[in-house]
Amino acid sequence: MDKIKWCLGKREGLSLIEPNSDLAEAYIRKAEEALESIGVNVIKDWKISTAYYTLYFSLYSVLTKIGIKCEIHSCTIAFAKRFLSEFFSEEDLAFTEDSLRARIDSQYYIDRTVPDEQYNKMVKNAPEFLVKCKSILIKLNENRINKIRMEFRNIIK
């Protein structure tokens, strides 16, 4: 089944709202706070969580500026894959997906470990992803936002 259609069918899934630059900036601030927490935390599991939330809040700020609401993290990533490929590479979004899995494994499971390679990549790349999303927010003008919203509306119908 198409992930976007699945997400549209969920109560907390994807939905169209009014674009909101102020809320997008608030999510960027949350991403910055999460990034600061990476340096403060000494426990690997918490570093993984804060690195992931740096990525997630950064990405969600872009959706908010476009006027997309979503409370299911995998649906947020699916939206980015489908509608934001001009801004994010496949590697960016695969990294975000891998980071989501790492956060879930470290936060909810005692018997799962996150490989050091993924952990190190998350800690190293979280600041770069935040900067990338800030850059996208600047590039997102009204025409681009309307184009993305129209593409999304066509799927909703």
Image (tube, rainbow, N blue to C red):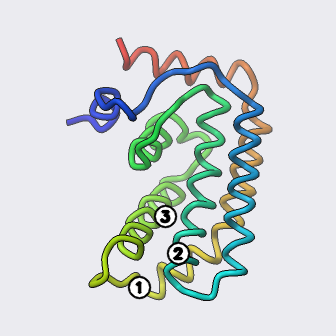
Residue beneath label 1, please? 115
Answer left or right for 112 relative to 27. left
Q: Residue 11, relative to residue 53: is it above or below?
A: above
Residue 63 image position (x, y, % from top left): 59, 36
Residue at the outermost top position: 157
Cα separation, mark 1 vs mark 3, equals 14 Å
Q: Amino acid at mark 3?
A: Phe
Upstream in sequence: badge 2 or badge 1: 2
Task: Say whether residue 67 is left or right of residue 21.
Answer: left
Q: Residue at x 40, y 42 (%)?
A: 75
**Circle 3 sits on which residue?**
95
149 left or right of 137 in image:
left
At horizontal 45% and vertical 25% (from top left) the residue drawn is 15
Q: Which mark is residue 48?
A: 2
Q: CA distance from mark 2 to mark 3?
A: 13 Å
**Badge 2 or badge 3: first in the primary sequence:** 2
Task: State the residue in front, 133 or 74.
Answer: 74
